[in-house]
C-alpha cells in the first residue's frame, strides 16, 4: 500500500510538472498565433517596410520626441516605397504604418522572452528531461532563425522595387507555421499523454495514414496563400467559381522560365491557391465525416466534427475575401482561420497517434 501511494504521488507530481510546461507552451503558441496574425495585418496595411533598419536592442523603444519621428521619417524617404508608392505621405501617415511594424517586431521580442526565461527556469529546476529539452532547444534555434529571416524578407523590399520577395515572404510565414506546429504538438503531448485502446482496422487505420498527409496539404495551402499575398494576386479575378468568366485565365505562362509562373505570375498563383484550397476543403469534409466512426473514442469524433466546420468556415472566408477584394478585417480573419484549421488538424493527428 505504501509503495502504491509513493508511485501514485510521484506520477501525480510528474503530471503536474508536465501540465505546467504544457500551459507555458500553449501560451507561447498563442503568442506565435498572434504574431502571424499581426504580421498579416502589417502587410495588408502596407506597413512592413516602414522601419528601414534592424536594431534588436535599440529598436525596442519607439520614438519619444518630434525630432526622433522626423529622423525616422527622413530615413524612410530614402527608400523606394516612399518615392514610388507613398510620395504624398506626411508624418501623421507615416506614424500609422510605423506603429504596425513596430508592434510586430515588439511582439517577436516578447515571444523570445516568454519562451527563453521559463525554459531556463525549468532547466535550472530540472523539470525537463533530455528529449523534451532537445525539442525546446530546437524551437529556440528556429525562433532565432525566424527573426533573421524576418529582416531578410524586409530587406528585399528596400531595393529598387518596393515589394518584399514572395519567396522570402513564404519562407518567413512557413517557418512561423513550423514553429507554431512544433510548439502546439509538444504541448499536446504533455497535457494529453495517456493512450487509449482502439481498433487499428478499417476507417481508423485509413485516418491514421491519411491525416499526416492532410496536415501537409493544409501547410502547403497556407504557403500558396503566402505567394498569393506576396504577389498581390488576390486583387484581380474577384469572381467565383470562374475567374472573370473563365475556368483558366489567360497569360498564365507569360513568364520565362516556365516555373516562375507558379510563384510570380498573379493569375496562375491565384489559380493554384484556388485549386489547392478546393482540394483541401473536399478532403477535409470527407475525413471529418469518416472521423465520426464509432471505432474512435468520443473525444476524437468531436475533434473531427470541429474539423469539418472549420474547413467549411475557412473555405467560405476565403471566397468572401476574394469576392470583396481583400478587405483587411476579412483577410485577417482568413489568415487566422488558416492557423486555427491547422491547429485542429494537428489536434486530430495527435488523438489518432496516442492510441495503443
Image (cartoon, rainbow, N blue to C red):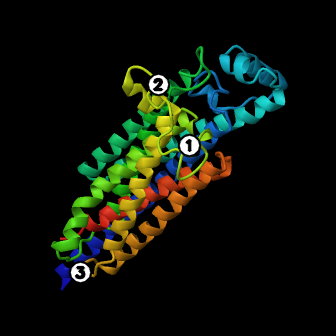
What residue lies at 29% left-to-right and 60% top-to-bottom?
211
Badge 1 element: helix
Label 1 vs label 3, nearer the camera: 1
Q: Which residue is mark 3?
A: 5
Question: Distance of mark 1 from mark 3, alpha carbons?
Answer: 42 Å
Closest to the observer, 3 or 349:
349
Q: Which residue is mark 2?
A: 254
3 over 257 or under it: above or below: below
Q: Earlier in the sequence, mark 1 or mark 2?
A: 1
Question: Distance of mark 1 from mark 2, alpha carbons?
Answer: 44 Å
Closest to the observer, 344 or 225:
225
| Cβ–Cβ under 8 Å for marks 1 and 3 | no
Closest to the observer, 145 or 335:
335
Q: Earlier in the sequence, mark 1 or mark 3?
A: 3
Question: Distance of mark 3 from mark 2, alpha carbons?
Answer: 73 Å
Q: Which residue is mark 1?
A: 110
88 sits to left or right of 119 = right
What residue lies at 71% left-to-right and 32% top-to-bottom?
98
Label 3 vs label 2, nearer the camera: 2
350 over 334 or under it: above or below: below
Label 3 neighbourhood size at 10 Å, few (<14), some (14-19), many (20+)?
A: few
What residue lies at 45% left-to-right and 58% top-to-bottom?
341
- Residue 17 visible at all: no
Badge 3 element: helix
Percent position of residue 244, x then y: 58, 44
- Residue 72 visible at all: yes
Q: Earlier in the sequence, mark 3 or mark 2?
A: 3
Badge 2 element: loop
Label 2 neighbourhood size at 10 Å, few (<14), some (14-19), many (20+)?
A: few
Percent position of residue 105, x then y: 59, 36
155 sits to left or right of 190 = right
Percent position of residue 179, x then y: 40, 45
Amino acid at each position: 500500500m505504501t509503495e502504491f501511494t509513493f508511485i501514485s504521488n510521484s506520477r501525480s507530481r510528474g503530471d503536474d510538472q508536465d501540465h505546467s510546461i504544457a500551459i507555458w507552451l500553449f501560451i507561447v503558441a498563442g503568442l506565435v498565433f498572434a504574431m502571424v496574425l499581426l504580421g498579416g495585418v502589417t502587410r495588408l496595411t502596407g506597413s512592413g517596410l516602414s522601419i528601414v533598419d534592424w536594431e534588436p536592442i535599440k529598436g525596442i523603444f519607439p520614438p519619444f520626441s518630434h525630432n526622433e519621428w522626423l529622423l525616422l521619417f527622413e530615413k524612410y524617404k530614402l527608400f523606394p516605397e516612399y518615392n514610388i508608392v507613398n510620395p504624398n505621405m506626411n508624418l501623421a501617415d507615416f506614424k500609422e504604418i510605423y506603429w504596425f511594424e513596430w508592434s510586430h517586431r515588439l511582439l517577436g521580442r516578447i515571444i523570445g522572452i516568454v519562451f527563453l526565461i521559463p525554459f531556463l527556469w525549468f532547466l535550472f529546476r530540472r523539470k525537463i528531461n533530455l528529449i523534451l529539452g532537445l525539442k525546446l532547444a530546437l524551437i529556440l534555434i528556429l525562433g532565432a532563425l525566424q527573426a533573421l529571416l524576418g529582416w531578410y524578407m524586409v530587406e528585399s523590399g528596400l531595393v529598387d522595387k518596393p515589394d518584399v520577395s514572395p519567396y522570402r515572404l513564404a519562407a518567413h510565414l512557413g517557418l512561423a507555421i513550423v514553429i507554431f506546429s512544433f510548439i502546439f504538438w509538444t504541448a499536446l503531448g504533455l497535457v494529453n499523454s495517456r493512450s487509449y485502446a482502439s481498433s487499428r482496422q478499417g476507417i481508423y487505420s485509413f485516418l491514421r495514414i491519411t491525416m499526416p498527409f492532410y496536415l501537409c496539404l493544409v501547410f502547403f495551402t497556407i504557403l500558396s496563400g503566402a505567394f498569393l499575398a506576396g504577389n498581390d494576386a488576390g486583387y484581380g479575378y474577384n469572381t467565383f467559381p470562374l475567374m472573370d468568366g473563365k475556368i483558366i485565365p489567360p497569360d498564365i505562362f507569360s513568364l520565362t522560365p516556365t516555373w516562375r509562373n507558379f510563384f510570380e505570375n498573379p493569375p496562375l498563383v491565384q489559380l493554384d491557391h484556388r485549386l489547392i484550397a478546393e482540394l483541401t476543403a473536399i478532403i477535409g469534409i470527407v475525413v471529418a465525416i469518416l472521423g465520426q466512426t464509432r471505432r474512435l473514442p468520443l473525444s476524437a469524433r468531436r475533434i473531427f466534427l470541429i474539423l469539418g466546420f472549420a474547413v467549411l468556415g475557412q473555405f467560405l472566408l476565403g471566397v468572401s475575401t476574394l469576392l470583396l477584394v481583400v478587405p483587411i478585417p476579412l483577410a485577417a480573419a482568413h489568415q487566422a482561420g488558416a492557423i486555427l484549421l491547422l491547429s485542429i488538424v494537428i489536434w486530430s493527428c495527435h488523438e489518432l497517434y496516442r492510441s495503443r
